[in-house]
Amino acid sequence: MAGLIPFNRKNSNLARTESGFEDFYNILDDFFNDGLMPSRNLLKDSFKIDIQEKEKEYIIEAELPGVKKDEIDLSIDGDNLCISINRCEEKEEKDEKKNFIHKERRSSSMSRVVRLAGAKLDEIKAKLDEGVLAVTIPKEEKKDSNRKINIE
């Protein structure tokens, strides 16, 4: 029976062996953990982005399933594109016969920053379609840096 009780594998030698079940073990450890703050891996808990470079533009796609347009903040800070998500959910159930009130609130935020070197920041276009945010960023035309230098 003792083998069925989850224990904190992060502090044991099992954490060092790769078995393919690390995420499952982490969920179990967080569920049975008495601490207030569950341990999370920020790289895995953030949304995924893909960046493509084409001849005349960059295309950034961010996977945002279930996120509404008004929950996304897309901004430019210097040469950086900032994609931020802020979600607040509130659920309330009432049953007057049983004098029962149930309220849940959940709030989450995530953000990713992409450096945009050599981009036309004034011509950025973004579209949210079926949970995928597509941002198209035109490239600045490269100036010819080759030139002949006269010697005196």
Image (spheres, rainbow, N blue to C red):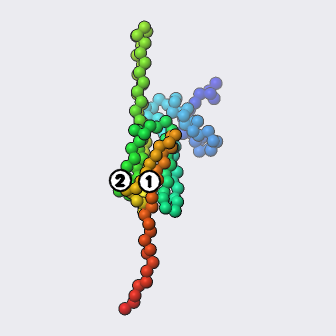
| In front of the other: 61 or 24 | 61
The answer, for residue 48, to whether it is visible in the render is: yes
The residue under the point 35% across, 56% down is: 78
The residue under the point 49% across, 61% down is: 56
The residue under the point 41% across, 85% down is: 149
- Quadrant where the image shows the C terminus: bottom left
Residue 103: quadrant of the picture: top left
Q: Is residue 11 above or below residue 80?
A: above
| In front of the other: 132 or 36 | 132
Q: Is residue 141 above or below residue 145?
A: above
Q: Position of residue 108 (x, y in %)?
A: 42, 36
Residue linked to disc 1: 114
| In front of the other: 74 or 86 | 74
Q: Position of residue 36 (x, y in %)?
A: 43, 32
Q: Position of residue 13 (x, y in %)?
A: 59, 41
Numbered marks: total: 2
The residue under the point 52% across, 60% down is: 54
Q: Position of residue 4 (x, y in %)?
A: 62, 27
| In this picture, residue 22 sits left or right of residue 136 | right
Near mark 1 (Cα within 10 A), the count class, few <14, some 14-19 or many ≥20, is some
Near mark 2 (Cα within 10 A), the count class, few <14, some 14-19 or many ≥20, is few
Q: Disc 2 on helix, strand or loop?
A: strand
| In this picture, residue 150 sits left or right of residue 65 | left
Residue linked to disc 2: 77
- Quadrant where the image shows the N terminus: top right
Q: Disc 1 on helix, strand or loop?
A: strand
| In front of the other: 29 or 87 | 87
- Answer yes or no: do the residues labelled 1 and 2 have beta carbons within 8 Å? no
